[in-house]
Image: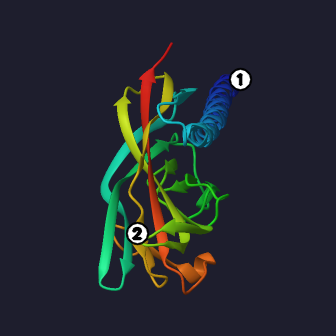
Amino acid sequence: MRRNLAVSTVLSTIILSSVLLVIVGIASFAANNAVNAQIENAQFDQAKNVLLSLTQVVKKVMFTPQSSGYVRSSFWNTIPQFVETGENLTVTIVDDDKNWAYHVPANIIKIKGGRYVGVLTPANLLGNDSLLLTDASSSLGRVKAFQSDGAWTSLDYLRVRCVYIGTSNYFNGISYERFNVVEITIVNFTFGVFEPGNQVFITVQNLGITALPSIQVSDNFTLHVSLTSGGVSANCTLTKLGGETGKPVLINLIFVNIEISMLKGG
């Protein structure tokens, strides 16, 4: 009887120890996952802030040719990518039977979060989904967070600003004539060196501003903005811009050439 009791005590001790080990293991695993999730979410938030900071640097150098700036960052559990989509952002000006078309590459910077990060609802952190902006205050850059086989944050300049400047007198070769003046600004967003690492400098350089000769059109012109893939487009007319009908229009097109590079840093 005593022997059976001793065996039962030993077995109970072994079972209890095993259960405790399992509980400790599960708790340790859960704790590690919780810590990793916190770290990865913090780094994903940092990635969002990096892209938001980049837009501020682009804004700062936008109209100063050959100027530059940078953002310093680290990537431990996030993966940066420079994505050349192969698409184009196309701007077309249509006036009666004439049209002018201009194209810039649809390039995007993307950063993927760690496996413990998720984005429940896609959201624009800066800018909007429109391809066409008709005011001077909205951001040409868009930073968003979304879920697509993992959590992502991205930066693109897939939009065009078209604003009505007012009216001005111009010499038409015979006499002075009053014109509506419309200005279109397009960011040609391109990539330079890409050297990802744990510690990096992301540089922004204004390679120059290309101002095309003014285009003279009638007051019933249409501006059309679209992506190569189709499905998303936007249109604008002089009436929508608030211009004066009955007067011809001069359209000034400005291309701001911005190059982004990523360089390893210490």
Considering the image in quadrants, where does the N terminus appear? top right
Residue drawn at 36 percent across, 46 percent down: 83
The quadrant in which residue 90 appears is bottom left
Q: Which of 23 and 66 is in front in this view?
A: 66
Q: Do the residues labelled 1 and 2 touch (CB within 8 Å)?
A: no
Does residue 62 sit above or below 223 in this rendering? above
The quadrant in which residue 89 appears is bottom left
| Mark 1 vs 2, N-terminal side | 1
Question: Residue 2, which numbered label?
Answer: 1
Q: Determine if residue 215 is in view.
A: yes
Q: Where is residue 24 in the image (x, y as percent from the top left)?
A: 66, 29
| Badge nearest the viewer, 1 or 2 | 2
Q: Position of residue 208 (x, y in %)?
A: 43, 39
Q: Determine if residue 151 is in view.
A: no
Does residue 127 sit above or below 21 in this rendering? below
Q: Amino acid under label 1?
A: Arg
Label 2 packing within 10 angstroms: few (<14), some (14-19), many (20+): few
Q: Mark 2 points at which residue?
A: 173
* Number of marks present in the image shown: 2
Q: Which of 134 and 164 is in front in this view?
A: 164
Q: What element carries label 1?
A: helix
Q: Amino acid under label 2?
A: Gly
Residue drawn at 60 percent across, 34 percent down: 43
